[in-house]
Amino acid sequence: MDNLNNSNADKKLVEIKDLSISFFTPAGEVKAVRGVSWSLREGEALGIVGESGSGKSVSVYALMGILQNPGKVIGGSITFNNIDMLKLKESQWRLIRGKDMSMIFQDPMTSLNPVYTVGNQIAETVLAHTRTTAQKANKEAVKSLARVHIPNPERRARQYPFEFSGGMRQRAMISMALSCEPKLLIADEPTTALDVTIQAQIIELLKELKKNTNMGIILITHDMGIITDICEDVIIMYGGQVMESASVKELYKNPAHPYTLGLLECLPRLSSDSDEPLKPIEGSPVDLLNPPKGCPFAPRCFKCMKICLNNQPPNFEIKPGHHSACWLHQYQSGRD
């Protein structure tokens, strides 16, 4: 993350600075991402957490060069592997996507082509980015399936997506993403459509891949629970902005922003009474067609003050590597 890694700036794999993205719709300008900054070092995993519509995926789509119209980057910079990504032409994007950076989407059934075999689709990725023959690409597809622990990969490579279970399809998507050994793997809510047992298997697989390679991982999720298993750092997003950023251990030990506290209170605990209901965050998400002048979370915040409604809070440093955008920290620290 931008405020965690200044001492290792030369090792940053991804760096996003003051990124702003809007969707220009007939109803008006939807300000989906507003001045977001974060970075990722090689070999580490970053969790991006927030509710639907918080801007988690949109910022990463811009990084991948797959932001669809009417979405446009209107400010900021995106650097990947020391390349200024916003200056690239589409032909240059294609050389990087699938080879140096890959993405796993939420629903593998809609991401896999139903009329081609799984092996054929993986081999197609290999052929697109390497100078090899179709025969060698098919062998690489089988090896890639074996790498993600799909049993009998030779037979499975000849099967179609409908012949795979949900968990197996997600493994096949991970296999495809890893087929060219990328420097960056982006997982956009990879466990959302899976049951808890398969979720655990997918997270274990990502942990294993991270351990055995030096690739960076960006895990996008609304589930605060799964980031503890794989991520070193985490950013909390709401209303198109970063509310809090810290190491995962620090965030769970000392959550600072009221929104982060709300997300953590939504998690079930083994120590709590089985009849005790979970605490939801009251209210509705912010309207990004007309974002508020102040803190986007203010209308739903149980600690909201007058200044929160009218003024954007700065990014206060709670301690080195831990930042929170909340006016409460000004008063807690005794600042004017």
Image: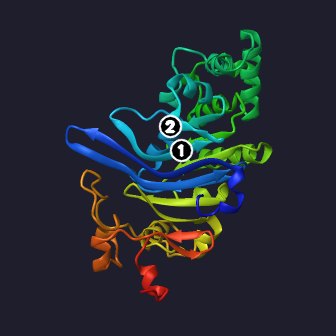
Q: Nearer the viewer, residue 65 or 267?
A: 65
Quarter of the N terminus within the rendering: bottom right
Judging from the image, what secondary structure is the residue with disc 2 in?
A: helix
The residue carrying mark 1 is: 78
Q: Count the marks: how many?
A: 2
Horizontal arrangement in the rendering, residue 28 relative to residue 218 (left or right): left
Residue 147 in the image: x percent, y percent?
76, 33
The percent coordinates of residue 44 (x first, y second) are: 69, 52
Contact, mark 2 vs mark 1 (Cβ under 8 Å): yes
Q: Looking at the image, is 138 positioned above or below residue 220?
A: above
Residue 189 horizontal/vertical position (percent): 52, 45
Measured as percent of width and height from the top left, residue 277 is found at 41, 70
Residue designated by label 2: 86
Name the outermost residue toward the bottom: 334
Where is residue 271, by image quadrant? Answer: bottom right
Could you tell whether 299 is left or right of 178 in the image? left
- Can residue 176 be spotted in the picture? yes
Q: Secondary structure at mark 1?
A: strand
Task: Inspect this view and state whether residue 190 appears.
Answer: no
What is the distance, in whole Å, between disc 2 and disc 1 at their CAs?
6 Å
Q: Is residue 215 above or below residue 45?
A: above
Query: Looking at numbered disc 2 in the image, what kind of residue is underneath it?
Result: Leu
Using the image, determine if residue 166 lies above or below residue 10: above
Question: Split into 4 quadrants, where in the image is the C terminus?
Answer: bottom left
